[in-house]
Image (cartoon, helix red, strand yellow):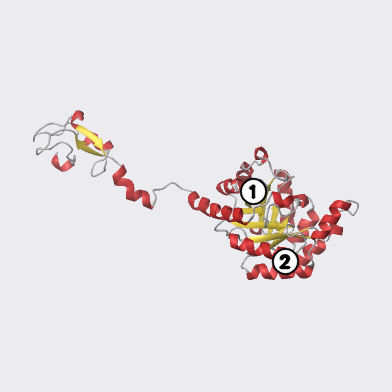
Amino acid sequence: MNNFKNLKKTFIIAEIGNNHEGSFKNAIKLINEAKNCGVDAVKFQTFNTSYYINKLEKKRFSKLKSFELSKKNFLKLSNYTKKKKLKFISTPFDFESAKFLSKIVDVFKISSGDNNFYDLIKFCGAFNKPLIISTGLINLSEIRKILKILNSIKFPQKKLAFLHCVSDYPVKDNEANLLSVSYLKDKLPITVGLSDHALGIESSLVAVSLGAKIIEKHFTLNNNFSNFRDHKISLDPKNMSKMVTSINRVEKMLGNYSKSISKNEKKNLNSMRRSIYFDLSLKKGSKIKREHLKIVRPFKKLNPNDISKVLGKKIKKNVKDSDLVTLKIL
């Protein structure tokens, strides 16, 4: 993937994040399940906990430390992901991790928590890899500031995508504000998508219908895998498959930005349109009045709007009830 402007279908990311809980074996299982679900990419988080969480936050630090995967394992995960013909994405939470990832990711991701960490954004942008930025915790003016910063380092806009995101877990229905997808699409010259923290798949389907070209959804092997929060807001394999299938269907339903008669509509056109028929028998030479006619299906010759062409005309031959009115018999 070189850029987001050429996306022909919704780019679906299974966000594994830390749902592997530090287990390389679980990470491989998650990649395999994601592939089976039909997604386009998997996303991880890469960090050195010491440069991510303050050591004084002992409980939080300890949990994240237990989730750390080694660089060696990330290299293996990247190679395995690409072997599975999926894109490998990761969110770096420190400069060292970003530098390491620059050699193995297809796409960088910046989390909502770091979308005001401009030095990290510029650092990732300097590698000239496609960059996805979540927009939780910020408004349009702050998004434009990010765009300005990336423009200052000549980062190509075609390689940039912003994802509407609400940084709450899970997002309440009345705070999902999915119209932000349309809003950002109208306001920015950038590919727009959704980083979905709502429960279920409905929000992602709505986002696609509103123009989202990227969907990122948390993914787990089992919603009850552990008490780690992310499992509860994630889709399991069954529901991720359902979301992928549903998005593909929504895309087909959306069609093109136009209004035209479909191929199958054309097949139904004559049977559903009306023509002008006689409503009683008349003898040759009779002058046609409105009460002599009925307008019914199917369409054969004259449409309902042609009635003025026949009223007051004399017929050249006898006609029976339900005979078709044509200009030849007038």
Image quadrant in which you'd find residue 40: bottom right
Name the residue located 18 percent from the left edge and 38 percent from the top edge: 322
Dot 2 crowding, Cα within 10 Å, few <14, some 14–19, many 20+ = few
Quarter placement of the N terminus = bottom right
Question: SS class of the residue under badge 2?
Answer: helix
Give the spatial CA distance, label 2 vs label 1.
Answer: 41 Å
**Dots 2 and 1: beta carbons under 8 Å?**
no
**For this view, does 70 lie left or right of residue 40?**
right
Q: Classify 279 as above or below 83.
A: above
Q: Nearer the viewer, residue 57 or 316?
A: 57
Residue 216 location (% of width, % of height): 65, 54
Question: Looking at the image, can residue 157 be seen?
Answer: no
Residue 16 location (% of width, % of height): 70, 58
Q: Amino acid at mark 2?
A: Lys
Residue 188: assigned label:
1
Q: Closer to the camera: disc 2 or disc 1?
A: 2
Q: Nearer the viewer, residue 112 or 120?
A: 112
Residue 176 location (% of width, % of height): 66, 42
- The earlier-in-sequence mark between 2 and 1 is 2
Image quadrant in which you'd find residue 124: bottom right
Residue 36 location (% of width, % of height): 59, 62
Residue 25: assigned label:
2
Q: Amino acid at mark 1?
A: Leu
